[in-house]
Image (cartoon, rainbow, N blue to C red):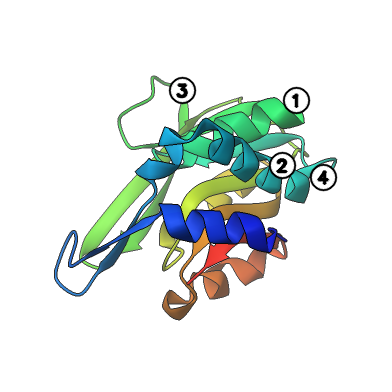
Amino acid sequence: MASQELISKLEATIENIADFPIPGIQFKDISSIFLDPKLYEEVIEDLVKFSKGKVDAVCGIESRGYLFGIAIAVALEVPFILIRKKGKLPPPIISEKYDLEYGSAEIETREGQIKKGQRILIHDDLLATGGTTEAAAKLVKKQGAEVVQFSFLIGLKDLKGEEKLKKFNAEIYHTLEY
């Protein structure tokens, strides 16, 4: 659990942008965290504490999941595996389709990078409805690995993304919750 001091610093740093990218959305702009290297380090320390000794690899979801995910993997001394949007990786790839509000999308990872039996942390910057994260977990499971943790900087509880992830019986952590 994040310290109240870290939570306060983040709440003072993250900017809320009304009606972006569409009317009615309250966008959480995390880019200001990267202007403060010490704060970024504190965020990484918090996320690493959740996963230390519990995972064999970190999967980060394109693209904002890379911002913290790579640093988490480095601190844990485990591999970092890219989960990318369709068409961004050379073959051979493993893919997973999922539904969006209007249409569908697909994510991919390189075949052979996720090893059978690995304990995987899936990281992204924000948990909203959970659709992309659920697809990432299915992608991991397709390759014989186990999703043991999900971590996020921010969780939006009203969008009920955690409900989609509960079926994986994995720990779920977010530093901030709105």
What amino acid type is highlighted by mark number 2? Val
| Mark 3 or 2: the one toward you | 2
- Tell me which numbered mark, 4 or 1, is placed earlier along the sequence: 4
Q: Which of 149 and 85 is in front in this view?
A: 149
Q: Is residue 24 above or below residue 57?
A: below
For the point 75% across and 51% down, which residue is it?
Answer: 50
Marks 2/1: CA distance? 11 Å
Tell me the CA gap for discs 1 and 3: 26 Å
Mark 1 packing: few (<14 Cα in 10 Å), some, or many (20+)? few
Q: Mark 2 points at which residue?
A: 48
- Disc number lying in front (4 or 2): 2
* Residue at image point 82% right, 45% down: 54
Q: With 171 as the anchor, is 141 left or right in this view?
A: left
Residue 77: assigned label: 1
Q: Which residue matches tag 4?
A: 54
Tell me if label 2 and label 1 are in contact, CB under 8 Å: no
Label drawn at residue 173: none
In percent of width and height, residue 13 lies at 43, 52
Nearer to us of marks 4 and 3 is: 4
Q: What is the number of the mark on residue 92?
A: 3
First in sequence, mark 1 or 3: give its number: 1
Q: Do the residues labelled 4 and 3 touch (CB within 8 Å)?
A: no
Which element is circle 4 on? loop
Residue 11, relative to residue 141: is it above or below? below
